[in-house]
Image: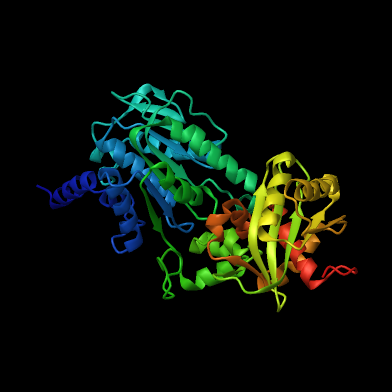
Amino acid sequence: MDRDLIKLGAKIELAKRGFFFYCNLKAPDFYKKDRKFLVDLCNELQAFYEQSGYDVLIINEPPRHGKSRTAGCFVEWILGEHPEEKIMTGSYNETLSTVFSKNVRNTIQEEKADKNKVVYTDVFPDRAIKKGDGSMNLWSLEGGYNNYLATSPGGTATGFGASILIIDDLIKNAEEAYNESIKEKHWDWFVNTMLSRLEEGGKIIIIMTRWASDDLAGKALEELPELGYKVKHVNMKAMQDDGSMLCDEILSKESFLLKTKAMGEDIASANYQQEPIDLKGKLYELKTYEELPTFKHIYNYTDTADKGDDYLCSIDYGVSFDNEAYIIDVLYTKDDMEITEKAQAEMMHKDKVNKARIESNNGGGVYARNVERIMKVELNTNHTVFDAFHQSNNKQARILSNSSWVNQHIYVPTTWRNKWPEFAKDVIKYQREGKNKHDDCADAITGIAETLSKPPTYSFD
């Protein structure tokens, strides 16, 4: 027997059993055995599919390192061994999801024209696309039913149940990474559409470049475990901590430095190092405290909700003898004023606030008078002096110009993320540049900075 045929037969047998060997047989010039990160990636995918320890696998990997290519190969390999699986993939838009689908479908349909070139049916001879059921985005295998559907956040998944969900790179660019509404739409689509189609015992794979702390990967890492899913995270950086590259052949250190030099630091870190762009571009890095010092004053600053989607942000803070601000309590809510007026009055009474500054724009003056009335009439105290004032300066300019003072002089408790989760999240994510969904927290802490660093012309002491 021809020795080459024997070798090929051995490789085909290995390809059936091992996903990396399948990739290596199909594209040996890319899936080289000495490219350790690809071997590791393929082994992680196979282990996740074949073992029952995890429900969700999240893979973050830099561009041009074979994320989408490997995901497509994985679909082919799974259907070769398990034609009963029903796989749904989601990509950035309908065009990309269609390309993904066509690549997989065309691989399965490829006919052998060169005896020296391996095609899909050499490895899995019993697989074929069902005649009359091979559209670009939805197709079946012979003997199967609805084995594959490609969709996107703008597409549909009606009537399709999936045993495996694969999400491939939903965020297009840095502009989308900064856009809160787009990221929320991605999460809503994933939870309300994709998860609703997952069958009992199904598996989820999210494979993408890490853009933002609240991109789909970030939200999944944070929220899916709370819903009972067991999540595994594989994170691959282009440049390792010791300065070596993930794969010099794909991206050398020289090319990496050249490419990233032309980018902003935040975009380069997200694209290549899997460091969320919003954490690189964030405006605030507040100091923390474990114990409170002695205060000379206890103040409150309140930014009332201007519009229906805004938060009321009311902050009680102590002022130390060296003029540092220590946040004691926070009311950060979208509740109606009938609720927040009493809640703020009770919070300030509890904290023994000396003076309260409340922005009087858009009904803030009425709000301030109601809080003052509640304290005097219902709580029987006149301990707090009220100052309702009109804020006419440009909000964004105020926030940016006071940010350095905020980072140097405002302290939060070490447990602030648990005490005030919504407030903490919006402060941490607030971007120097880009579209911020909520600026109420930034406005309020800026008000603290203005009160202490640039006091009003009248005496507030």
Asked whether, in this view, residue 216 is left or right of residue 139, the answer is right
Position of the C terminus, as image quadrant, is: bottom right
Say which of 417 and 122 sits in front: 417
Which residue in the rendered view is the most extreme toward the top? 132
Give the colouring mode of the picture. rainbow
Which residue in the rendered view is the most extreme toward the right? 457
Residue 325 x/y as whole percent: 69, 69
Q: Residue at x 34, y 36 (%)?
A: 202
Residue 19 x/y as whole percent: 28, 48
Residue 212 falls in which quadrant of the image?
bottom right
In the image, residue 54 above or below residue 284: above
Residue 260 x/y as whole percent: 57, 67
Q: Residue at x 55, y 58 (%)?
A: 417
Say which of 249 and 413 sits in front: 413
Which residue in the rendered view is the most extreme toward the bottom? 322
Residue 118 falls in which quadrant of the image?
top left
